[in-house]
Each structure stands twice: as C-alpha cells, then as structure tokens.
Image (cartoon, helix red, strand yellow):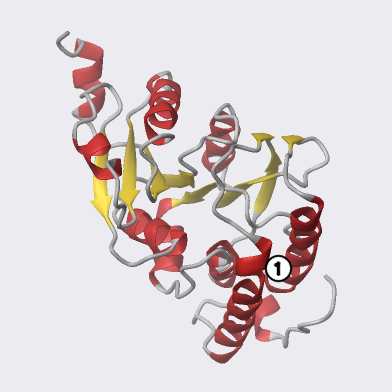
Amino acid sequence: MPPSPLGDERTSRPPLLEIVVPAFNEERRLPGGLLQLCAKLARMPFPTAVIVVDNNSTDSTGEIVRTWPRGPVPVRLVECATPGKGAAVRAGLLDTRAPFVGFCDADMATDLNAIDVAFGLLLSGERVVVGSRAHAFSDVENRHSRVRELGAVGFRALARVLVRGVSDTQCGFKFFDGALVREAVAGLRTFGFAFDVELLARCVALGSTVLEIPVNWRDMPGSRFSPARHSAGILLELGRIWLRLRAAPSPGVSPRWEQPLDPVGSP
C-alpha cells in the first residue's frame, strides 16, 4: 500500500519529537514494541521519529530496523559497538536533532499514554520529565523477587544522594529538552546500569530540575539484570559517578552541586 498524503506531509518536515530505543538482542520484543510506539506517535498532530540503537547485537535486531516498513513515523537505525545501555542511549541522543527528545525501553513496559503527559510538560517549560514507578499515583505490576526489590530500595537511596529529590532514576521512560540533554549526554561516562543517575545529575548540573510523573508500568520478561552478578558493579559505578561529579563539575553547575555531597546521607 502506498504511503498516504498525510504520511508524506509528516515525514517531509523535521520531527518535533524524537524517541530513542536502545536495543541489544531484541529480535523477539522489538517488532511488537516498535508497532506500539509508532502507532502511538502516528496519532500525535506533529512530525515525530524513532531512532533504534543496535548495541552490538548478535541476532537480527539491526535487520528488523533496516527493513522496517515506511510509514508516517520514520524509524532509523544507529549502530553502537560500545557495550552497555548507557552507551546506546548516549549514541542515540547525540544523533537526535529535534527540539524535544526522549528514550524508552524496547519492551514498552511503560504505558505509552504517558508520552502525552511528558510532551505537554516539556511544551509548558519543563526541561526534564521522567517516569517514576515510586510515584504515589503510579500503577506498577512488579514480578521481581524479594531480593531484587530490596536491592532496588538500596539503589534508590544511594541514587538520591546524587540526584536529590528523584525517587526513581531507573524507569526507562525519560523525556528532555533536546539541546539540554545533548549537552548533558556528551559528557556521560557511565555506560552500565547506573547511567541514568549520571545523566540526570548532569542535567541538574546544567541548571535543570527533574520532574517525575506517574506511570502505568508492567514488568516484562527478559530482563538481563541479576542482583547476584551486577550489584557490586553498580555500587562501583555510583561511586565513580559521585567522584567524577565532585572532581570536574560543569561550568554551568547549580549551587546544589557546588556544595560537598554526603555519600552516606539522605536528601
């Protein structure tokens, strides 16, 4: 079926919103996730686009994107050979050009209706809007083990030392002022699980605040995180972030980041 005139008109203009989807060996979940995301974005009354970052996959993830059918929402591929979700998100965000950008996980665990809320807040002047599963009005279906839940509580306590006032740094649903996040992510050096913490901290250092919004979130099978295998590495990442931000703050650092941080204190 040939593209509709509406599709041609949308794709002929630069996107107002670009969404990055990091993907590592996501051949099973990516097609359904892209269908959901493109269907959602196609209903928005302005041009949008999707960037899928293939993070050195060994399956058909890249081929799925390369052969994705043309439609009202362009989907393009960026390749990132550096391992780690943080590296993939960084590559994708640096490849954006839109005034407003975001990223979400390939499994679309966060209900995509939250895009409307996040985008509306960006239009109203917010610069960083993130989904929070810890928000009082969020609806969360969580099948994680008790051990993993306890680990998440500990991680959030440590993350709040670096990004004060943010209750959930790890929800894979974040939206930004494009110019701000491209500047912030250029200096990102954490490519593992804790990359979100450094990214948000850098946005704060550039003078932004972080606004959390409630989400409907469903735990999806296929998570690669293991408390036994990854906890020590995550603690090391958080320590490195803390030292890095203290040692070399950005020129636009806000007063909060000019003060010493207490690594064991609570916000």
Q: Is residue 78 above or below residue 195?
A: above
Q: Which residue is mark 1?
A: 159
Q: Residue at x 78, y 84 (%)?
A: 262
Q: Position of residue 185 (x, y in %)?
A: 43, 65
Q: Residues within 10 Å of mark 1 (few under 14, many from 20)?
A: many
Q: Is residue 97 above or below residue 41?
A: below
Judge by depth and name the residue closer to the eye, 193 or 173: 193
76 horizontally vs 131: left or right: left
Q: Is residue 144 above or below residue 183?
A: above
Q: Residue at x 50, y 67 (%)?
A: 192
User: Under tag 1, what secondary structure?
Assistant: helix
Judge by depth and name the residue closer to the eye, 187 or 86: 86
Q: Residue furthest front?
A: 228
Q: Residue at x 60, y 87 (%)?
A: 243
Q: Residue furthest top?
A: 1
Q: Position of residue 163 (x, y in %)?
A: 68, 67
Q: Position of residue 265 (x, y in %)?
A: 84, 79
Q: How many marks?
A: 1
Q: Amino acid at mark 1?
A: Ala
Q: Residue furthest bottom?
A: 247
207 horizontally vs 104: left or right: right
145 horizontally vs 177: left or right: right
Corner quadrant of residue 65: top left
Q: Residue at x 56, y 48 (%)?
A: 223
- Dividing the image into 4 quarters, which one contains the C terminus? bottom right
- Dividing the image into 4 quarters, which one contains the N terminus? top left
